[in-house]
Image (cartoon, rainbow, N blue to C red):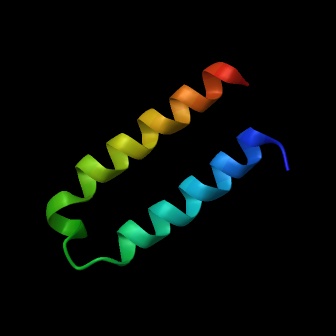
Amino acid sequence: MEANDVLLRFLAYRLKFWASLQKFDIYGRGWTNRGADNLLFAAEDN
């Protein structure tokens, strides 16, 4: 796999993991914002 494909898969699993946590209702917005920042960074290199 190419590096961007690995990153996309990693972030997808990361988001699924965050959504499964009991504290997602409290911290989920921050977690997903950081995940979005990672996706934006990866898109710059694509």
Viewer-nearest residue: 36 or 5: 5
Q: Residue at x 48, y 37 (%)?
A: 38
Q: Residue at x 66, y 57 (%)?
A: 9
Where does the image place residue 2, in percent across and percent down from the top left?
Answer: 83, 42
Quadrant location, the C terminus: top right
Q: How many labels sit on residues? A: 0
Image vertical order of residue 17 relative to residue 5, above or below: below
Q: In the displayed structure, does residue 7 sit left or right of residue 14?
A: right
Q: Quadrant of residue 10?
A: bottom right
Where does the image place residue 32, in percent across and percent down from the top left?
Answer: 36, 50
Q: Residue at x 75, y 47 (%)?
A: 5
For this orientation, the residue located farthest to the right is 1
Where does the image place residue 41, in percent across and percent down from the top left?
Answer: 53, 27
Q: In the displayed structure, does residue 23 sit left or right of residue 34?
A: left
Where does the image place residue 42, in percent across and percent down from the top left?
Answer: 61, 31
Viewer-nearest residue: 46 or 3: 3
Image vertical order of residue 9 relative to residue 3, above or below: below
For this orientation, the residue located farthest to the left is 26
Q: Quadrant of residue 3?
A: top right
Image vertical order of residue 19 relative to residue 10, above or below: below
Q: In the displayed structure, does residue 34 sit left or right of residue 26?
A: right
